[in-house]
Image (cartoon, rainbow, N blue to C red):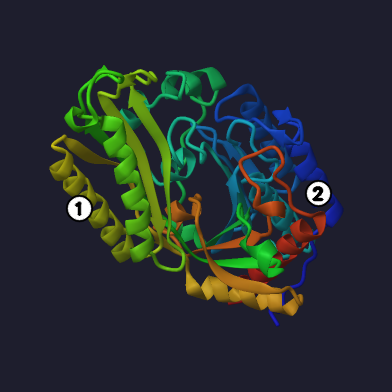
């Protein structure tokens, strides 16, 4: 056993989560976009809750909320993001933030702050309203002014203007010192159906998938859809659809057990029923934790694009627009989460994360680990996202147990 003993307060944990969900409330979910009024108000409330927990809390110049324990390191940093997607769920990111505050408070209440200092953090804009993982990357100096100056949201509003309007711009900038921390822990809802399907209550994340995204453009020639014979057409839409089917079959032949792929957009120009498409564009995304598999899938995509260009006599360009490398979690920290789950009799499993998280940034600078709890129905990024209160509380107890084990060495 760890030799450290402290207990979280389940009622307080759930009450804080429910209160955070009132900022940007939309039905049973939230819309709390980065730098929106609900986001700004939520961050001010989170700073207050951190201060009430006994942490020295502040909001930095991009809206990260950081609460430091009243002790020197080595500390354990716990948190996630508090922004949401439009029409998102009440737990995505928020749960991990409240776990950090609750565990830090429980440690202080137990008189263990010197032996087990816990800092809490709420990162800004993990959801990419303006810049993906803006907050966590900023805390390590990994976002330049040039990147901020050109960043805009989907409506064309500038990130620099949003920061200024939020009131955060006047706050002192903050950088995290990796030397202060022995670990970063992030708890999150799974956002998928695996844990529920396996009737397992705790997921111990082994790695966060790498993501590659491509825009594949096909050139054609417009014409009257009723008068140009089929054999004489240069139909960009037909080529794009044929290529899409070939990609789906080709990826399946190369996939590993956790590989996923998606064709999320198909655009035809001009998009009229009686006009042969003069251009087509498909957006393709591939995800896996193994860089070699990602390389194989990208090679297959490019080979199939060349093959369809040769057979059709039409130009096809495949442009990579996103490349996020896989991020491995620390196996030793994962083992401590497993041991804590075992001590509580909680069924658990090691699994990859198919979604990106701030931990994929933090793991570059300090040992990092993630814990998942089940998502009911596998739903996330929707207002119907939910997790049972029992699983929310169990997840926090498991993470608290892991903190005690890590702090005791």
Residue at image position (66%, 26%) is 38
Image mark for residue 209? none
Which residue lies under the disc numbered 1? Answer: 303
Residue 112, image quadrant: bottom right
Q: Can the viewer see residue 322?
A: no
Q: Nearer the viewer, residue 177 or 158?
A: 158
Residue at image position (79%, 41%) is 18
Residue at image position (73%, 79%) is 343
Which residue lies under the disc numbered 2? Answer: 14
Vertical comparison of 171 with 96: above or below: above
Please state, as top left, top right, bottom left or bottom right, where the C terminus lies in the image.
Answer: bottom right
x and y percentages locating residue 165 in the rendered image = 53, 17
SS class, disc 2: helix
Q: Nearer the viewer, residue 181 or 374?
A: 374
**Mark 1 vs 2: CB contact within 8 A:** no
Vertical comparison of 92 with 288: above or below: above
x and y percentages locating residue 87 in the rendered image = 64, 32
Please state, as top left, top right, bottom left or bottom right, where the N terminus lies in the image.
Answer: bottom right
SS class, disc 1: helix
User: Disc 1 or disc 2, which is closer to the eye?
Assistant: 1
Q: Is residue 47 left or right of residue 260?
A: right
Q: Residues within 10 Å of mark 2 (few under 14, many from 20)?
A: some
| Residue reaching furthest to the right | 11
Vertical comparison of 173 with 149: above or below: below
Give the alpha-carbon distance from disc 1 to disc 2, as whole Å.
Answer: 52 Å
Q: Is residue 10 left or right of residue 65?
A: right
Looking at the image, is mark 1 or mark 2 earlier in the sequence?
2
x and y percentages locating residue 231 in the rendered image = 19, 32
Residue at image position (63%, 41%) is 57
Q: Can the viewer see residue 10?
A: yes
Residue 179, image quadrant: bottom left
């Amino acid at each position: 056993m760890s030799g450290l003993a402290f207990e979280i307060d389940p009622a307080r944990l759930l009450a804080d989560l429910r209160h955070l969900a009132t900022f940007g409330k939309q039905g049973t979910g939230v819309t709390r976009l980065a730098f929106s009024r609900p986001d700004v108000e939520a961050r001010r409330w989170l700073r207050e809750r951190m201060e009430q927990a006994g942490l020295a809390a502040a909001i930095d110049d991009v809206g990260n909320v950081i609460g430091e324990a009243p002790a020197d390191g080595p500390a354990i940093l716990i948190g996630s993001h508090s922004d949401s997607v439009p029409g998102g769920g009440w737990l995505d990111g928020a749960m991990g933030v409240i776990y950090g505050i609750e565990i830090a408070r429980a440690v202080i209440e137990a008189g263990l702050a010197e032996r087990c200092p816990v800092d809490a953090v709420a990162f800004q804009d993990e959801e990419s309203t303006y810049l993906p993982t803006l907050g966590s990357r900023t805390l390590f100096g990994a976002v330049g002014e040039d990147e901020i100056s050109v960043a805009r949201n989907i409506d064309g509003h500038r990130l620099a203007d949003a920061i200024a309007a939020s009131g955060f711009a006047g706050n002192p900038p903050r950088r995290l010192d990796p030397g202060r921390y022995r670990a970063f822990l992030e708890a999150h809802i799974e956002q998928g159906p695996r844990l529920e399907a396996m009737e397992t209550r705790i997921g111990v994340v082994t790695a966060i998938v790498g993501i590659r995204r491509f825009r594949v453009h096909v050139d054609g020639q417009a014409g009257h859809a009723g008068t140009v014979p089929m054999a004489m057409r240069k139909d960009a839409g037909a080529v794009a659809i044929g290529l899409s089917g070939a990609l789906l079959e080709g990826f399946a032949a190369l996939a590993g057990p956790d590989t996923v792929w998606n064709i999320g957009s198909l655009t035809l120009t001009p998009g009229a029923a009686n006009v042969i498409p003069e251009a087509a564009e498909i957006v393709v995304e591939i995800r896996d934790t193994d860089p070699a598999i990602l390389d194989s899938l990208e090679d297959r995509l490019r080979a199939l694009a060349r093959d369809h260009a040769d057979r059709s006599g039409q130009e096809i360009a495949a442009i990579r627009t996103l490349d996020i490398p896989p991020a491995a979690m620390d196996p030793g920290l994962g083992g401590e989460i497993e041991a804590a789950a075992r001590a509580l009799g909680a069924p658990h499993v090691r699994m990859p994360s198919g979604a990106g998280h701030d931990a994929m940034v933090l793991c570059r600078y300090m040992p990092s680990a993630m814990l998942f709890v089940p998502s009911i129905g596998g739903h996330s990024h929707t207002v119907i996202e939910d997790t049972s209160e029992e699983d929310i509380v169990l997840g926090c107890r498991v993470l608290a147990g892991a903190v005690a084990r890590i702090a005791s060495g």
